[in-house]
Image (spheres, grey):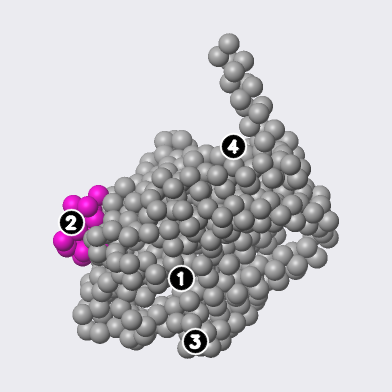
Amino acid sequence: MDIKTETIAKGTIIIIIATFASKILGFIREILIAKYYGASVITDSYLIATILPSALAGIIGGALTTVFIPLFIEERNKNGDQKAWEVASSVIITSVIFLGIATLSAYFISPYFIQLVAPGFDLERYSLSLRLNRIMLPSIIFHGLLGLLTGVLQAYRHFSIPALAALMYNIFLISFITIFYLNPVIGLGIGNLTGIITQAFLVTIYLFKWKKLSLKDFKANFFHPIIKKIFLLMVPIFFGTGISYINLIVDRIFASKLPVGTIAALNFATRVKDIPIGLFAAALSQAIFPSAAQFAANDEIKNVRELLSRSLESLWLVMVPFTMGLILLARPTVVFFFQRGAFTSVATTITSEALVYYSLGVVAVASLSIIGRFFYSYQDTSTPVKISSIGLLINIVLNLILVRYMAHKGLALATSISSIFISITLLEILRKKIGGIDGKVLLVNALKIVLATLIMGIFILLTRNHISNFVNFLGVGIGSVGIYAIMVIALQCRAGIKLYQSLLKRLKHLSETRS
């Protein structure tokens, strides 16, 4: 497992660096939206407008990518690279056709869809949402294409270019917002579409050059048996991915009936909460997926267990303290990130309150990105769907109850509770499926992480009242990280010690190289 571990580590580092840069740009994007538009009619309308293109791209493109990678690797192992590429070519062409049909259909349903997901919108917000939505709908095709091409590259352990290409989306959107901020249709709508087109174009060019391809190499065999298998396996993922979007839609329906700006505030809170998830969990899950699929295909159960156990522990090492930090420093975090321009102190209060309750589910949501990959590695797409469906029902029921007493805070809490239920249930099912996950070792190290986090939390509680400017905020953050790192090493947490030893090794190598 050493070679694959090194590959996973290298892939994870590349993705983390690129994702970190993308997250910084993404936050600059959100800061600019908050500055120019605040929690307002424009921001609410834009967020509703993005649901349909994002949902269709995520459901169709996401399902294709998830199913495609294990089958592509399996075909390459059995029949060689040439046959595997023939399958990839057929899947890409077939998918683009279906994505095109989905896009055309979306133009007809978008007016009714916006009325469905935002029943509390007045005519002004509805009209602006519809205009923005129609501009962004072609992104469905490019999102789907990007997902498939990224899947091909990741199957060959090419992580860097797809990760770096993701930067272009935010670069273009930031540029358009800055230049055309007085015209949100151009700044937000056309900027969004231009960014995803550029991202897909760069990945396509790289794949063509690396594989030395031309358009002649793209041939479609619509009747290839794997095409049929892919679409059969996609059906459960349609529902599984669709459930997450239904969750979003349900939240937006309830939020649209709350005061203007609530949708925007919930979105800004989600963006902050998603920083650790997007930065580390998404990167780690992408990096381990090819190896998990390979181990599953070769029936290497021991390696599957070890990979799952170490991946979860590495994930929790980062996510647990991040959760504590977000909960205890919610308000200063929102203040320093967003409170400027059109983003008022009222918007800060709503956003920070939502952030606290969203943060309760951070570890669960992050863990799902890892757990789900292992189910998909075994081509089991139905189990996550079944459990997620139950989670959706829990979320809807909790929304109905909690929104009456807690308003926007109730929506955030309902989301976290349902995520925790789904994560725990799926992990237990997976544990039984693979005959264990080194549970005792994992539990001991998880408790060490929690203890180190609690001590870090005490430090934050003692110092947060002294935060009056960004320097103070940064100082508390750095101090918290330092205390946590010391406690992790002192408690001999497995993942922490491994990271510490790896850093020492790299520093020693650098010093020897310079001398």
Measured Cα–Cα span from mark 3 to mark 4: 48 Å
Viewer-side label of 4, 1 = 1
Lower sequence index among marks 3 and 2: 2
Measured Cα–Cα span from mark 2 to mark 4: 39 Å
| Residue 393 sits above or below residue 275 on the image | below
Residues at badges 3 and 4 in contact (C-beta under 8 Å)?
no
Q: Is residue 176 magenta?
A: yes
Q: Main secondary structure of the magenta part?
A: helix
Q: Residue at x 75, y 45 (%)?
A: 491
> Badge 4 is on which residue?
10
Secondary structure of the residue carrying numbered label 4: helix
Q: Residue at x 25, y 85 (%)?
A: 122
Label 1 crowd bin: few (<14), some (14–19), many (20+), radius 10 Å = many
Viewer-side label of 3, 2 = 3
What amino acid type should be assigned to the residue bearing mark 4? Lys
- The one of 136 and 509 positioned closer to us in this rendering: 509
Residue 95 appearing in the image: no
What amino acid type should be assigned to the residue bearing mark 1? Glu
Label 3 crowd bin: few (<14), some (14–19), many (20+), radius 10 Å = few
> Badge 2 is on which residue?
180
Viewer-side label of 3, 4 = 3
> Badge 3 is on which residue?
405
Lower sequence index among marks 2 and 4: 4
* Residue range of the region highlighted in magenta in the rendering: 175-188
> Badge 1 is on which residue?
353
- The one of 138 and 322 positioned closer to us in this rendering: 322
Q: Quadrant of the C terminus?
A: top right
Lower sequence index among marks 1 and 3: 1
Secondary structure of the residue carrying numbered label 3: helix
Q: Quadrant of the N terminus?
A: top right
